[in-house]
Structures are given as C-alpha cells and as structure tokens.
Amino acid sequence: MKHTIRWRSSSFAMSEAHTITGGADRRLLAIALFGPHEERRRMVAEALLARAGVRVREFSELPTAADTATLAQQFNAIVLDADHDPAHVLELVETLCADGSAYVMAYSARADMKLAVRFMRAGVREFFTLPLDSTEVAGALTRAAQYHGTSSAPEKSAAKLFVFLGTKGGCGVTTLAANFALALAQESEQKTLLIDLGLPLGDVAINLGMKTQYSVVNALMDTERLDPSFLRSLIAKHSTGLEVLPAPNEFPQISVTEDAINKLIAVARQSHDFVVVDAGARVDLIGTAVFEQASTIYLVTQVGITELRNAHRMITQFFATRGPSLQIVLNRYTQRALLFDDSQIAKTLTRPAELKIPDDYAAARRTRNTATPMVLVDSTIAQTIREMARSAAGLTAEKDGKRGLFRLLR
C-alpha cells in the first residue's frame, strides 16, 4: 500500500491526506513530508515515526506557493526533499519561513555542504543527509516541538555565561579565555561555546590552532535568521569537542548593534550548557547582555602601573556592585618580581584578587611554537586554569572513583 497523496490544485484537501501516527501520545507533533522519490521519502517517514507522539502526512508532489499559508497553519513541521528541483524548493522555503511561523526541515541524499548552507540561509532549521542519524532526527523533533510549545518537557535553563575582559591589550585575556573554555568543556563534559567578541581583532582561533570558515560576524549580520540551528551552521568544533565562534580573518565592515549582540547571547545560551565570551578590552559592551547576564566576569590584569590603574577605573565605574560575580585575575603573577606587595595591589583594586595565574614562560613559548592550547599540556598554568574551570562549573574537589572525573554539584 502506497502512503502517498497526489494533489494538483493550488489548495489541498486535508481530509485526503493519508495519516500515519507513531506512538499513542495525544500531544501529537504534526509533520508534512514532501518528496517525489518514494523510497527516500519512506526512509525519512520511518525515521520521524521512531519518536512517539508524531503524526506524518506524506505527499509525493511539492506544494505551490499558494499552499504555504495553509501548511504553516496545519502542521508543526514541514519536511522537504532538497534534491528535487532545489531552486523551486528554496523559493518554497523562503516563503514558508518569511513570517517565522513554520518550522522547516530538508533532507538530501548528497553530502553537499554548499547545498546545506544555502538551505539554512534560506530559513531551513534542520538539514539531514541520508542515511539519517536517529539521534539527529530525535533532537530535531524535540526542537520542533519546543518551537511550537507542543512538548511537555521542562524548558532547558539558560546556559551559564562567563565573560573575560582585559584591562588593556596584551594582558593575556584571549589566552585565558580560550584555555578556560577548553578546560570547562573537558572537565564538565557539557556543551560549551566560546565566542570571540574581540572585534575588530580577535585571535581565539589562532590560540586554539584552528582554521575556521565562518565567524561571529556572520551571526551578527543576519540576526533575523539567528536561531540555534543557524548558529550551529556557523560554529567550528575543536578536536576536544569545544565549540567556537571565532572572530573573522579580515577586518569586518559592519556596524554591530547592541540588539545584535543581545540576540547572539540569547541564542547561544539557549543551545548550550556553558557560554564563554572573550570580550578583549571592549568596555563598550558593558551595557549589553554580555555583561548584564554574565554569571561571572573575569577581569584580567597584570601587576603593572597601567594595568592596575585601568583595573581600578573599571571596577569603580562599572563593577562596584557586582560582588562575588566579579573575579579579579592577576595574570603572569610572580610574587618575587612584583613592584607592589599584595596589600598595595588589593588597595588599588579595592579588594584582593581572587585568582592568580602563575607566570610560566616555558609553557607560553611551547603554546606559541606548536599552536597547542597550554591547558592540554601539564604545567602550573594548566593546573590553575583547570581548577578555575572546575570551580566555575560547580565541580567538587572529590574525584569520582568510577570515572576518575570531578563530579558536578547538582
């Protein structure tokens, strides 16, 4: 028995569509599946129906532009075959996604990154390559259900946001932010994103030894389409699992608004467990969500006249009421070589520094020469940064005997 419907008019009769339901959950997720290639369409339908509470209606012909409004009203998600007349399907996607009400997915038998990017930019939220990955499909259906409020699962709490701000260029804020984020991802084993907002110059990717295709500018230029799915298409992944949204390789020719920054932070926190931001020395971001929503702000300085002066000005003007959520980090700290003693430093900073990163020239030189993050090679700096990351993640100092990892405090 063929589970297909052929319709030729500009408006289709919903009563004619053959319905297949997976599971007995009454909170059904209604999906329209379009594809002229029956075998591929059936493969996709079976993958969708593996999740309980899903209703699939298959169509062997693509809809017309006039049908798109009805589709968005009748279905929670629309799945399209990207291989059949891609130009026409792209037009349908743009029409369906124009008002943001439709959750559109697409699939292809080709592992074509350019095709996937074209569809994602047109508005597709999920793009699958055959054969389908059951985990990816399950995740996509969960996001579609949450998008329309049909899921009974509790909403995920927003990610913890950690921000690194330097008192001047060259104080090591990027090195600390990059290595902290990497250690945080490894120690917590949770989804962690590092965002480089050190525009126009930013070298997080270089610190991690990464070559990247897209950057934070791609996200900030297209905030109307910015959602977890689009963000995922821009992110680069480090070999350790850390996700990175780097600064661009060239000087960006855009004017970034506070609304764009706020949207990026909101989407990033929605789709990750931890978000780390390298803010460089950008005090112009103080009024944005970067700092207003930060769980912890790490103010990175050194024991020098200029750095301590800048730190004092920042603390008294911007962070006087932050309390414990502001952590002062003394980088490249060597007590024997200090011009000032700890009491003088605390007086200048209005409080003692919470964190001291030791000066380890050998580790820093090895990082520069090999493009290997210093936290991946055992050293006093690596140990300090890992302890810093474990504390930020809420990990106990007691090791779990079964896994040999620090445990989360829940």
Image (cartoon, rainbow, N blue to C red):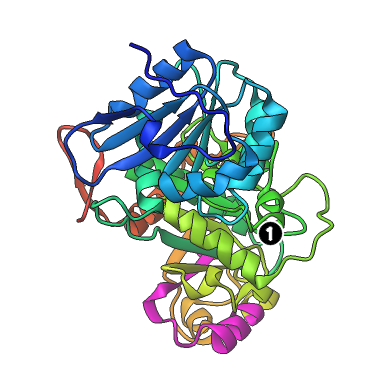
Work out which quarter of the rendered image holds the N terminus and state it.
Answer: top left
Relative depth, front residue between 75 and 354: 75
Left/right placement of residue 402 relative to residue 10 reads left
Helix, strand or loop at label 1? It is: loop
Relative image position of residue 164 (x, y in whole percent): 55, 63
Relative depth, front residue between 163 and 405: 163
Which picture quadrant has residue 65? top right
Relative depth, front residue between 393 and 226: 226
Work out which quarter of the rendered image holds the C terminus and state it.
Answer: bottom left
Relative image position of residue 343 (x, y in whole percent): 46, 82
Which picture quadrant has residue 205? top right
Q: Which residue is mark 1?
A: 198
State the count of labels. 1
The answer to if 288 sits in the magenta stretch is: no
Q: Is residue 58 visible?
A: yes
Relative image position of residue 123 (x, y in whole percent): 61, 44
**Which region shows up in magenta?**
309-335
Which residue is depicted at the point 55% across and 68% down?
Answer: 290
The answer to if 323 sits in the magenta stretch is: yes
Relative depth, front residue between 285 and 142: 142
Which picture quadrant has residue 288? bottom right
- Amino acid type of disc 1? Gly
Q: Is residue 210 visible?
A: no
Reply above or below: 375 against 217.
above
Relative image position of residue 88 (x, y in whole percent): 69, 31
Q: How many residues crowd mark 1 within 10 Å: few (<14), some (14–19), many (20+)?
A: many
Reply above or below: 346 against 29.
below
Left/right placement of residue 91 relative to residue 253 reads left
